[in-house]
Image (cartoon, rainbow, N blue to C red):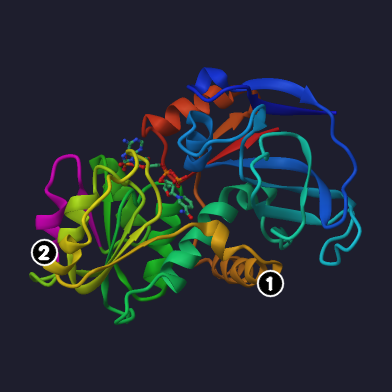
Amino acid sequence: MSLAVQIRQHGGPEELHLVDVAVGEPGPGEIRIRHHAIGLNFIDVYHRTGLYPLSMPATIGMEAAGVVEAVGEGVTHLQVGDRAAYASQPPGSYCEVRVMPAKCVCKLPDAISFETGAAMMLKGLTAQYLLKKTRPVEGLQPGDHVLFHAAAGGVGLIACQWAKALGLQLIATAGTDAKCQLALANGAAHAINYATEDFAARVKEITGGKGVKVVYDSVGKDTWDKSLDCLRPFGLMASFGNASGPVAPFAPGALGAKGSLYVTRQTLFTHIATRESTQAMADDLFAVVASGQVKIHIAQRYPLAEVQQAHRDLEARKTTGSTILTL
Ligand SMILES: NC(=O)c1ccc[n+]([C@@H]2O[C@H](COP(=O)([O-])OP(=O)(O)OC[C@H]3O[C@@H](n4cnc5c(N)ncnc54)[C@H](OP(=O)(O)O)[C@@H]3O)[C@@H](O)[C@H]2O)c1
């Protein structure tokens, strides 16, 4: 048996219930893992509210770290007793023990703690594919400006540091002056408080009127229109989230009028669809963390039983950096 956080219907944080569930043996291609720490992510909010619908009842959560307890047939990259961490479909990480597909689970280097592993896999692999694989047609060279919204959050603080390591001038946005300072302290070249400033005007100012080659936008509804105004011709609008709500349908003609822009909507789960791609991306993430160029900031810890409060704080924009649920 395992303690798990289940929802029986979509709704607010009050729908998150701690229950006992039975845990079986892993089948072919699966493992059983005992968690030591669990990562909290904004996608967990979309799963809870039903923006991304799930069949019920559902255990949510997409990220954790722990020890492999049992290995199913055909799994060769993990053994019983291995320390491991993952960002993975299907949801179900808000629990003590689970059976899950092995392909997205990676051995965790000894130098990385369980808490750090749980705080960095989903967010760090996202920063990896955004900065390394989601690039404008003209490419990115050291010194180029990129705009990154919600830069003091979980994905954001990793992206600030990684962009700096790549030589990029990351222009951060965040909702308070304190969050802007945090982004700057983590490698952002500039920071804009988008609650009080016109971020498109500030981006034009910072880039000498040119605009940026790429906008990484996880805020969605509230930032979409102005983000397009931040791009230079042939620039890339990389949408990867909807913290403020989903982006409204738009007319492609606007992209022509604003300078033959490109738009993409990315999701991590396409990038980690295979064992090989997951491991290659994880190795890149482990290396940048091991080098000290990217530090994982766990700014909030909640016992699993206080998961409702964790969701309230995440949605109320009270958190910075990564948040974990402890066991
Ligand atoms: N597509 C993918 O592959 C992928 C993977 C991982 C994450 N994501 C997305 O990336 C974003 C960041 O994820 P995260 O887990 O690291 O969360 P997070 O950034 O720690 O938290 C979300 C942040 O979004 C900002 N925000 C702006 N408007 C908001 C609103 N109306 N309500 C709540 N927050 C708002 C807040 O920062 P400010 O107060 O500074 O505005 C808030 O702290 C999320 O949108 C998530 O869905 C996408």
> What's under tag 1, amino acid-wise?
Glu
| Residue 234 in view, yes or no | yes
Along the horizontal axis of the image, is 157 left or right of 116?
A: left
Asked whether mark 1 lies closer than 8 Å to ligand 1, one says no
Q: Position of residue 168 (x, y in %)?
A: 32, 73
Spatial CA span between label 1 and label 2: 40 Å
Kind of element beneath mark 1 = helix
Q: Position of residue 144 (x, y in %)?
A: 26, 76
Residue 263: which numbered mark, if any? Answer: none
> What's under tag 2, amino acid-wise?
Lys
| Residue 295 in view, yes or no | no
Taking the image as four quarters, which one is ligand 1 found in? top left
Q: Tell me if mark 1 has few (under 14), some (14-19) or many (20+) residues whose alpha carbon lies within 10 angstroms of its own.
A: few
Near-viewer residue (270 or 114): 270
From the image, tell me which residue sits under label 1.
276
Near-viewer residue (29 or 285): 29
Q: How many marks overall?
A: 2
Along the horizontal axis of the image, is 28 left or right of 59?
A: right
Whether 151 is drawn above or below 20: the answer is: below
Q: Which residues are magenta?
A: 190-206
Near-viewer residue (66 or 113): 66
Q: Quadrant of residue 289?
A: bottom right
Kind of element beneath mark 2 = helix
Q: Position of residue 255 (x, y in %)?
A: 19, 65
From the image, tell me which residue sits under label 2.
204
